[in-house]
Structures are given as structure tokens and as C-alpha cells.
Amino acid sequence: MAYKNYLLLFTFENWNLEFENYHPIFYFRLTTFYYFEFMIVKTPPPPYYAVIFTNTRTDGDDGYATMAEKMDALAKEQPGYLGVESVRDGLGVTVSYWESLEAIKNWKANLEHLEAQNAGREKWYSAYKTRICKVERDYEFP
């Protein structure tokens, strides 16, 4: 059984109101509506790899939500991609899962992903750290 969280993004001019009500997280901003469904990823038996991207955002959207949606779709097309889990409550943490270090290397070098990385440094993130880990053991409930 997968446990689902939902992220709703609305675009309102130049201000952000963020609030959390238990599991659902809502971001309101005006004119544009985005819907993302998140759940705990079903991964294969270890070993596999995790890329942990921890970040703090700058103010405003400035195209971030559109690019995030695009990168999510693009990552799903990459060989070796296993899934992603993401949460933001001030601090953002995104964990993507991969079959191999080679798959991670290829994703990092993807031209569209490189453009998103550059835009992230220029306008979306005030700070970030990326960690790459080998998952040697996992367990779950239920």
C-alpha cells in the first residue's frame, strides 16, 4: 500500500502564503494551478542509490513550479530512475532513487537538467546541498 500526499500549487501575483494542514501541503500564488501527487516510492531490493537534495528557496516562484513539473517528467524518462519523494516546510528535501551511479551521472549531465540547475543557482535557491548515498538496506511499514 502506498501512502499519498498531495501538493497543490496556485499562482498569485507576487506574494506567497504557505500553510500546512496535516499531510496535505498547499502553496497559493494566483492564476496558475499545478497538482502533484506524492507517495512513498516502492523501490527494488537493495542495493540502489539515493540522491538527497536539501535546499532553501528564494522568495517568489519566477517559473520554479513549471520547471519542477518539467524536471519531474523528464527524470521519469531517464534510464535507471526509480522514483522521487519530496517535501517542503521551509526547508526542502527531495530524494530521488536510482539503479546505479551511472544513471545518476547521466541525469546530472542531461542538458535540460543542467539548464534547470543553472536557473536554480541564479534565481530559485538561496542555498542547497546534494548528497549521493548507496542504500544497502531498507524496510517498511506496513
Image (spheres, helix red, strand yellow):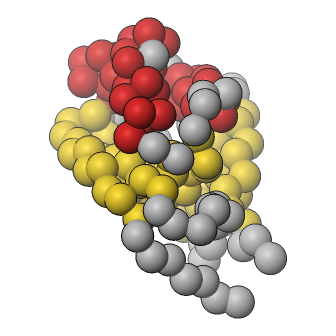
x then y, percent, for residue 104: 41, 35
Residue 37's spot in the image, x, y percent?
72, 52
* Location of residue 83 in the rendering, given as x and y in whole percent from the top left corner: 61, 49
In this view, the residue in front, 17 or 71, is 71
Seen from the viewer's position, the closer of residues 28 and 58 is: 58
Q: Residue at x 52, y 47 (%)?
A: 99
In which quarter of the view is residue 126 placed? top left
Most distant residue in the right direction: 1
Q: Classify the position of the N terminus by image quarter.
A: bottom right
The residue lying toward the viewer, choosing from 47 and 83, is 47
The quadrant holding residue 106 is top left
Residue 94 placement, left or right of 139: left
**Horizontal arrangement in the rendering, residue 107 relative to residue 122 (left or right):** right
Q: Is residue 36 visible?
A: yes
**Which residue shows up at 45% across the image and 16% down it?**
110
Q: Is residue 33 above or below residue 55?
A: above
In the rendered image, the residue lying farthest to the bottom is 142
Which residue is located at x 35 percent, y 52 percent?
Answer: 52
Residue at image point 45% right, 76% down: 137
User: Exactly how many numbered labels are in the figure?
Assistant: 0
Quadrant of the frame with the C terminus: bottom right
Quick check: 62 above or below 29? above
Q: Is residue 21 above or below residue 17?
A: below
The answer to whether residue 18 is left or right of residue 32 is left
Looking at the image, can residue 69 be seen? no
